[in-house]
Every structure is written in C-alpha cells, then in structure tokens.
Image: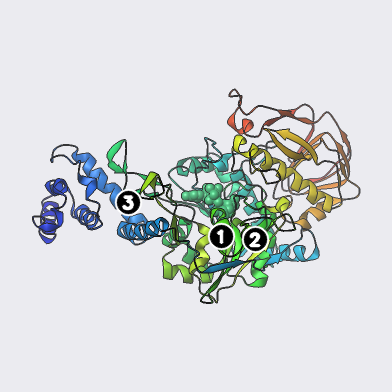
Amino acid sequence: MASAVDSTADTLSKLDVNADWASSAPNLKKNLSLLSPHQIELGKMLLEMGQGHLFEHWPEPGVDDDQKRAFFDQVARLNLSYPGGLASYMKIARELLADSKDGRNPFDGFTPSVPSGESLTFGDDNFVQFEETGVREMQNAAFVLVAGGLGERLGYNGIKVALPRESSTGTCFLQHYIESILALQDASCRLVEGGSSKLIPFVIMTSDDTHARTFELLESNSYFGMNPTQVKLLKQEKVACLDDNDARLAVDPRNKYVIQTKPHGHGDVHSLLYSSGLLNQWRDAGLRWVLFFQDTNGLLFKAIPAALGVSAIKQYHVNSLAVPRKAKEAIGGIAKLTHADGRTMVINVEYNQLDPLLRATGHPDGDVNCETGYSPFPGNINQLILELGPYIEELTKTGGAIKEFVNPKYKDASKTSFKSATRLECMMQDYPKTLPPTARVGFTVMDIWLAYAPVKNNPEDAAKVPKGNPYHSATSGEMAVYRANCRILEKAGVEVKGGVLQVFNEQEVEVWPRVTWKPSWASTFADVRSKVSGSCYISKDSTLVINGSKIFLEDLYLDGALVINSIEDAEVKVGGSVKNKGWILEEVDYKDASLPEEVRIRGFRINRVEQLEKTYNDPGKFCLKP
Ligand code: UGB
C-alpha cells in the first residue's frame, strides 16, 4: 500500500500537480489524490485534448469518489481498445468532422467506373469447377462472422444469429452456419489422400449487445456439433461519442461520470483479429484464406465454395462476393475509382455515398438502373475472402486500423451542432483502401436467388420498399431459402412446381415447396446431383426435410410433407409416391402480440397437418418406398 502511495506521489511530482497542466480544470486538480498514476496520465491527456468540460461538475474529494474512479476506468478501456488510443481517436474525429462540415466528399478527385470481375452462372461447368477447387481449399480456410450489430432496422429483441433461418425445421442462423462449415470441413478433408482431421477455425465478433447471448446460444447447444476449441468469440468495444465539431466527448445524460458510447462498426474485426494473435497462429498452421461473413444471410453458404475457388484460381488477395444490385438498394456498390493523379482502386462505395459521387462526376441522374434493370455497379454483400499472407502483411503496417468516417446529423445548415451525439465508424469492406496498387483486388458476382437474402428490415419498413426492390425481411429471407433449394433441385433434374405469388406482412413473395436439407447432405451442386436420380416430382404445397447425409432421392413423387432423419452410417434410398395433407402456411398478423416475435416478423406460421416422417438410427442400407 505504502509503495502505491509513494508511486502516486512520485507521479504527481513528475506530472507537476501544482503547476499549470491541471489549472484549466480546477475540479480535476482537487481530486488528483484519488487517482492512480495511470489515471493521472489519462487525465492529463484528456486536458491536452481539450476535454476539460468532463470535470466541470466534479465535486470536492469525498463526494462520488467511486464514480470518479469508475470514470477513469472507462477512459482507460476506451483508450486501450482504440488503435493509437483516445488521443488519436479525438484527433482523427476533429479532422473528419471538419471535412464533414465543409461538405468534403471522401471520394473527391475520384471518378467511378464499372470494374470487371468474375461473373458466375450457377450450375454450368465453370461454376462446378470453381466449387470443386473451393472445397479442396476449404481445409486451408478460417471463417469470421461479424455479429456485433444490434439489428436496429429489424427491431428484433433477440440476437439475429438466433433467429430461425426458416421455420420448417426452425434451424437458427448460427446452427446453419456451423453445420455448413463442418460439412465443408469434412468434404475438404475427405479429398486429402489418406484423409485429414484438420478443424476449420471459426471466429465470431460480438459486442456488448450480443456477446453474452451468443455465448449462451453456443453453450446451451453444445456448439451445434463443432468442437468448442474451434470457436473463438472476439468482443468489439464501443467508441466514445462526440458532442460537437471540436470532438468534445459526450457524457451520458443519465450519469455525468460516464462517457456516452456507440458501436464503431464491423470494420473493428480487422484490428481485433490482428491483436488477438490468431492470424499468425493460422499462418503457422498452414492456413491460406480468411472468409468474412454477416449475421443473417441464409443463402450465403451456397455461394461460398465457388467464391473460394475463384480466389484460389485467380489468386485474389481480396475477393468480394457481389450480386446484381437494384439502384438505391441499401447495399454498397463495387466500383473502380480512378483518381485525377492516376491512382485506382476497386472498392465498395456505400449506398449513401454512391448517388452523390455519381452526380458529382458527370452522371446527373445519380444511382439509377441501366438497361439490364439493375445498377451497373455490382452490389456488395460483404462476404470477403482475404488471402492470409498479404492480409497479415498489411495489418502489420496498419495494426488493423480501417479508414473511418463520421455521419453527424446536424441540427441546421450552420452545421455547428448535432441532433444527437455522433461517433467515428468503420466498415470491414474498407480494408482494401490502404492496399498498394499491386494488390490483386477482385470480386465475384453470383445470382441473387443463390447468394443473398439477408434479414435486416422489420415488416413495416419492408412493406414500404420501392416495388421491385428486395424486402430483406424475415419473410423474404425464408422464402428465398425454399426458392433456392427448389431451383437447385430443378437444375439437378427434379420437376418442382411452385413460384406462386402470395402476400405476407404486406410483402408479395414467391412461395415454393418448403424444401430444406442439412449442409452435410449437399454443400455443392455436384453433391446435389449425386443424390438425385430418376424422375422426381415435388408438388407446389409440399414440404421435404432432409436430415441426413446419405439420403438418395430416386423416382420420388411427393405431394405432401416428407421428413427423413438418418444417422451418418445409414444409407437411405427414398422413392415411390408420398401423398398426405402436408404442412400448410397460415397467415398471421405481425401486430398480434400473442404470437412469438420470430413468427410475427414472418407473417406466417406452419401448421403441420400431416406428414410421413421416417428416422433411421441404425447403420446399414435402407429403402423407403411407400
Ligand atoms: N456489425 C458488427 O459486427 N458490428 C457493428 O458495430 C455493426 C455491425 P448491418 P450495414 O450486405 O446488406 C453492410 O447493419 O452495415 C455486423 C455493408 O456495409 O446489417 O448497414 C452486423 O452484426 C453494405 O455495404 O449492415 O451494411 C452484421 O452482421 C452491404 O453489404 C454486419 O455487421 C450490407 O451490409 C452488417 O451490419 C449488406
């Protein structure tokens, strides 16, 4: 104890307590004896950065002392979690706020044009080859899910990864993602001569808003079959809010000893990965790829094998997955930007920046569709594949810091005060901004029906999206899963009836038979083709749930609901005619508070009237032919 007091005294004398540095904040000065040496250093830094207002209300020592220390604990956390510390944060904030006030466009001097990339057509030979290469490479990959967002637009009270991806099986997004990774891991390891037991690492970036619930979801479900050592949760911290153009830190209106904080954005994933040390571990283990993805895209894993194949064959350092984009849709556009000085980069231009950039560079109509009915700029779906070596090299230079932006909501045209406190934000897809021109940055475009159906909008907002633009709701997200599965089966030779338009939660969607399968049944188109043969038919109101890896459909006629469950060592041939009353989609009202939120946000529920369900729990070969 004595030594701590001595060291505080030493620091006080080193910092010259009685002299000038604290005189601008007399209330802090009076309280210095309460603080540790480190806290005093932080206090000095805050004053140097013009943050004296934080102490104006501080009473005499003896009053609220614990809260004063807690204030500095928070400052220490904020300082530690930002690359370069709080002083750097405030300096960058001042520069960006000045640019924003002056209306300076971050893309000033750049002209956008449509870049070239790889455009894939599902199911053709090219696609199948990319998938094959992708599966081979998969054992050299690590997956990173960014899941720290609150999902304010969706307005769902739980974490988004716990939402059912579809309600026929109720499988949540996180379970589907984990099972997809495990299926790819098995498929990839099987291709190694003599077999391999490599485990694909899976990182989930969480935040204070999602961390505990994500952990609990994993723990209570035994990690959905994944080895817990494969999974790492990295929690992002929020950043300090700013009250004005001088970047004065905002205090919480309910507690003046707390600095208000808000999320910093998904771009945090790079600095977190860097500081975790995982990237070097992965490199030492021989890994080559890092695949980033978002929380609620139920189709994504249908696109991943081919996209990784593109990365490997084209040797892309950065490969962004993209889909055709409707003008003004809330997804970024991938553009080639050429500067007046000759610099070029292929980068995502966020949806709110694309229109002004186009207008400022000779396109008076801004963000509009071209003759194809889509924007000429492919839509970024924020699935990035980075090559690990060049990624580590770049992060070693930047520490993982990503170019930030600020988006204050001004009270009036003078742009001197904000409606509410703002903060700096960063996006994971801005990673290529600091790359040298030699970096190989490409993208891969796939069909929307195959690759992209996020759940982001609440029913009311979804119902208001302009006609022809995607809803991005729980309703459309689920229907997209059925549609994609049906189209894939069709492509494999199955006759599938469906595509009937129906309205749920005021959104018109295509309704297809409710076909779902476990990722272990098929991760690629080649897998599907190998499991379907003869003449198969599925009627428009049918449901088919395939819960097992060695289930083969041969001459199956389905008009009703069929559920097949089987263990790994059971091989089941399914054929014949299955007819029953099936499972019926029943409309529900999203305002009906008596229903669970997960059901309401879809606008329908499944009434399981009648089905044929068969379970094969013993090893062997079986035939189901009703
Ligand atoms: N996320 C975090 O992990 N931490 C955060 O602080 C914030 C978010 P949104 P956004 O594919 O549809 C992105 O809010 O940011 C996670 C791209 O920028 O769903 O509006 C969060 O949990 C845009 O270019 O999306 O838009 C979620 O998993 C376009 O690609 C993810 O980050 C668009 O997504 C995305 O957060 C899209």
Q: Quadrant of residue 514?
A: top right
Q: As shown in the figure, which amino acid type bears the numbered disc 3?
A: Arg
Residue mark closest to the camera, 1 vs 3: 1
Image marks 1 and 3: residues in contact by CB distance under 8 Å: no
Residue count near mark 2 (Cα–Cα under 10 Å), binned few <14, some 14–19, many ≥20 = many
**Label whose residue precedes the other's in the sequence (1 or 2):** 1
Task: Looking at the picture, tell me which residue is in the foreground, 574 or 49.
Answer: 49
Rendered location of residue 156, percent (x, y) = 55, 36
Residue mark closest to the camera, 3 vs 2: 2
Rendered location of residue 308, percent (x, y) = 65, 63
Residue at 16% across, 50% down = 25
In the picture of the structure, the residue carrying the numbered disc 1 is 349
Residue at 24% across, 46% down = 54
Q: CA distance from mark 1 to mark 3?
A: 32 Å
In the picture of the structure, the residue carrying the numbered disc 3 is 77
| Side (left or right) of 252 relative to 344 | left
Image marks 1 and 2: residues in contact by CB distance under 8 Å: yes
| Side (left or right) of 419 relative to 480 | left
Q: As shown in the figure, which amino acid type bears the numbered disc 1?
A: Val
In the picture of the structure, the residue carrying the numbered disc 2 is 377
Q: Quadrant of residue 189?
A: bottom right
Rendered location of residue 335, percent (x, y) = 60, 64
